[in-house]
Image (cartoon, rainbow, N blue to C red):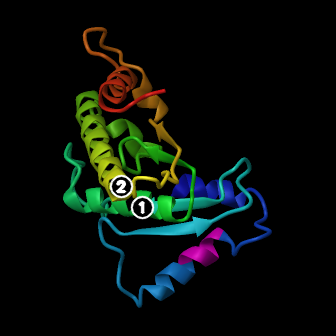
């Protein structure tokens, strides 16, 4: 969220309310109740360049406690709801953080490599489950709205310094090749 806020602040929003105004509207609409793990909201943008016009924000934790390897059921539910919303609104391309965590800034390097490896595998399983559920809901003649799914991994985890262990990128690629019909 911090990185998106920084990118939004670099140029003027011409078509939609400013990012922080959208966040305030979401906060006001929630009637003072905090968003819970698994909840999501969407902000719209015209000032990010490229084809980014909507950002889905999934609440993954309250920031307390250590990061776990498992992906909680509420995150599974939130991920499915986001993918369903993408399909219903004909969003064709989505970019997701592979770890489903906010690991920007100082906390990025705080996760041990082995934990990142396990977390990425568990997120991929959750993603596969959500995509399978969504595919099961489609009518036989109904094409999926979502066409492209990009997974983003923080740069500090892309390489593995231990040559005896495969990198997160390598294991992600293998998981996808073995789990999905890849073109």
| Left or right: 15, with 81 as reference point | right
| Residue at left offset 40%, top offset 24% | 169
Can residue 183 be found in the magenta stretch? no
In percent of width and height, residue 26 lies at 50, 79
Residue indicated by mark 1: 84
| Residue at left offset 20%, top offset 58% | 73
Q: Are marks 2 and 1 in contact (CB under 8 Å)?
A: yes
Residue 22 position by quadrant: bottom right
In percent of width and height, residue 116 lies at 29, 34
Identify the mark at residue 49; answer none if there is no mark.
none
Q: Is residue 2 above or below residue 183?
A: below
| Residue at left offset 57%, top offset 50% | 92
| Magenta stretch, main secondary structure class | helix
| Residue 166 in view in this figure | yes
Judging from the image, what secondary structure is the residue with disc 2 in?
helix
Dot 1: within a 10 Å radius of its alpha carbon, few (fewer than 14), some, or many (20 or more) residues?
A: many
In percent of width and height, residue 113 lies at 29, 28
Return the disc, 2 or 1, that comes first in the chain's sequence.
1
Residue indicated by mark 2: 134
Q: Which residues are magenta?
A: 19-23
């Amino acid at each position: 969220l911090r990185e998106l806020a920084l990118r939004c602040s670099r140029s003027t929003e011409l078509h939609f309310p400013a990012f922080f105004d959208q966040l305030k509207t979401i906060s006001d609409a929630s009637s003072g109740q905090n968003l819970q793990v698994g909840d999501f909201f969407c902000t719209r943008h015209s000032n990010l360049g490229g084809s980014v016009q909507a950002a889905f924000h999934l609440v993954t934790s309250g920031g307390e406690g250590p990061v776990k390897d498992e992906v909680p059921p509420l995150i599974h539910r939130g991920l499915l709801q986001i993918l369903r919303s993408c399909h219903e609104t004909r969003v064709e391309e989505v970019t997701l953080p592979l770890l489903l965590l906010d690991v920007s800034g100082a906390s990025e390097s705080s996760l041990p490599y082995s934990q990142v490896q396990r977390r990425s595998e568990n997120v991929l399983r959750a993603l596969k489950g959500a995509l399978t559920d969504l595919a099961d809901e489609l009518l036989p003649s109904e094409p999926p709205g979502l066409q492209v799914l990009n997974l983003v991994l923080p740069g500090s985890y892309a390489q593995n310094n231990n040559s005896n262990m495969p990198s997160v990128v390598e294991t992600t690629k293998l998981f996808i090749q073995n789990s999905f019909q890849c073109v």
